[in-house]
Amino acid sequence: MLRLKAASSSVEDFTNGTFRPVIEDEQGLNPANVKRVLFCSGKIYWDLLAESQKRNDGTTAIVRVEQLYPTPVDEIKATYAQYPNAELYWVQDEPANQGPWTYIGLFLPRYMNGQVAKLVSRPASASPATGSAKRHAAEQADLVARAFAR
């Protein structure tokens, strides 16, 4: 992430900005056209954004949840409410039995009127890593493709 120019911040972000627990989609999409909202946290955002730009996808919003606990429920609800026709997804790099999903998957439906997020992640695993850079890259490409698959 240190070498990824898209992930760098300007000085003004630190001097004039404030912490935002939820960062809404910044692609300038028309909310009426959005069919899928991808909530995520961390590095996976940049992979999803790159794929969205590559596909020129105008129907998928990508929302970053920067604070997992205490969960910013009001901000998440307000952000999702902007997309009345969209399905809710949680995307994470980690295997399904690790990372934020084990908390978010149980927590969110209580506050989203029963709306259950669909998970896009690696399969459940005893290990957080595959142990092979090639296999990791293939799994990452598959994960990102599944996030946009219709």
Image: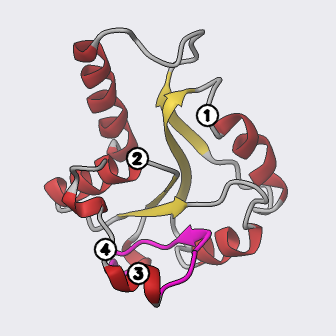
- For label 3, the residue is 13
Q: Which mark is residue 99?
A: 1
The magenta-colored residue range is 17-30
How far apart in space, not on screen, are marks 2 and 1 (Cα)? 12 Å
Q: Where residue 81 sits in the image (x, y, percent)? A: 62, 76
As measured in the structure, the alpha-carbon distance from the residue carrying label 4 to the one carrying label 2 is: 17 Å
Q: Is residue 97 above or below residue 72?
A: above
Q: Nearer the viewer, mark 2 or mark 3?
A: 3
Q: Which numbered disc covers residue 61? A: none
Q: Residue at x 24, y 62 (%)?
A: 6
Secondary structure under tag 3 reads helix
**Disc 2 and disc 3 in contact, CB within 8 angstroms:** no
**Disc 2 vs disc 1: Cβ atoms closer than 8 Å?**
no
Q: Nearer the viewer, residue 28 or 94?
A: 94
Residue underneath mark 2: 43
Residue 77, horizontal then vertical, whole percent: 69, 71
Q: Secondary structure at mark 2?
A: loop
Reading the chain from its start, which is encountered first: label 3 or label 4? 3
Residue sitting nearer the eye, 65 or 114: 65
Q: Earlier in the sequence, mark 1 or mark 3?
A: 3
Disc 3/disc 4 C-alpha distance (Å)? 18 Å
Which residue is drawn at the image coordinates 66% and 68% (left, top)?
76
Q: Can you identify the residue that label 4 sits on?
A: 27
User: Label 2: few (<14), some or many (≥20) within 10 Å?
Assistant: few
Going by the numbered disc 4, the residue's amino acid type is Gln
Q: Nearer the viewer, mark 1 or mark 3?
A: 3
The answer to whether residue 28 is magenta is yes
The image shows residue 15 at horizontal and vertical percentages of 45, 86
Residue at screen point 65% across, 78% down? 78
- Which mark is first along the chain, 1 or 4? 4
Q: CA distance from mark 4 to mark 1?
A: 26 Å
Q: Are marks 4 and 1 in contact (CB under 8 Å)?
A: no
